[in-house]
Image (tube, rainbow, N blue to C red):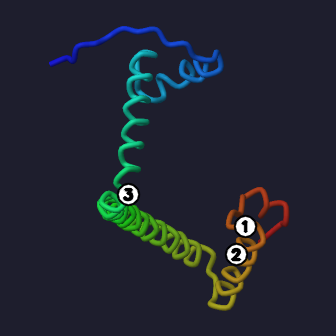
Amino acid sequence: MSQRKEKFGVSLPAETVKLMDENLLRLGLSSRAKLVDAAVNEYISLHILKQFPDELSEIYGAIEARGIKAMEDRMAGLLYKIAIEIAQMNLLLYDEMGLNDDDFYNLRRDAAKMVNHNGGIVHLKTIAKNKYR
């Protein structure tokens, strides 16, 4: 079922039209008309929502909380998988290099210093430049 469409002229600044054209595909829209329709609907929806802040804030708060909880759960799962991969690499290194406990502790300490010094990221180039072990 398609809605009846009404045609009317719209004048927009050239910069706005350029911005529309640059973002049509990224927004998943196939025409300027569809973008204008979506933008008008969004604008009016936001205006209507502002008229009922108390009633809607509860609903949107609950929706937002569920979304945040889902993201937290997903991140926790990904962090767990990363921890497993790191532990697996550590076990391989420990076994292959024949490290004793003191050497392994020193490697871990030095790695923590490098991570802290480099803002959480240590590139192989950084390690090679410092001639690290």
Where residue 86 sits in the image (x, y, percent)? 52, 70
Q: Are marks 2 and 3 in contact (CB under 8 Å)?
A: no
Residue 46 can be seen, yes or no: yes
Q: Are marks 1 and 2 in contact (CB under 8 Å)?
A: no
- Nearer to us in this view, 38 or 53: 53
Question: What residue does disc 2 label?
Answer: 111
Q: Residue at x 36, y 65 (%)?
A: 65
Residue 70 can be seen, yes or no: no
Separation of marks 1 and 2 at Cα, in angstroms: 12 Å
| Label 3 element class | helix
- Nearer to us in this view, 108 or 115: 115
Where residue 49 sits in the image (x, y, percent)? 36, 48
Question: What residue does disc 1 label?
Answer: 119
- Asked whether, in this view, residue 36 is left or right of residue 111, the answer is left
Identified by mark 1, the residue type is Gly
Q: Residue at x 36, y 67 (%)?
A: 69
Residue 74 occupies which quadrant of the picture? Answer: bottom left
The quarter of the image holding the N terminus is top left
Identified by mark 3, the residue type is Pro
As displayed, is residue 19 above or below residue 92? above
> Residue at the bottom extreme?
102
Give whichever of discs 3 and 1 has the lower sequence position.
3
Where residue 46 sits in the image (x, y, percent)? 41, 43
- Other residues around mark 3 within 10 Å, as few (<14) / some (14–19) / many (≥20): few
Residue 133 occupies which quadrant of the picture? Answer: bottom right
Give whichever of discs 1 and 2 has the lower sequence position.
2
Identified by mark 2, the residue type is Ala
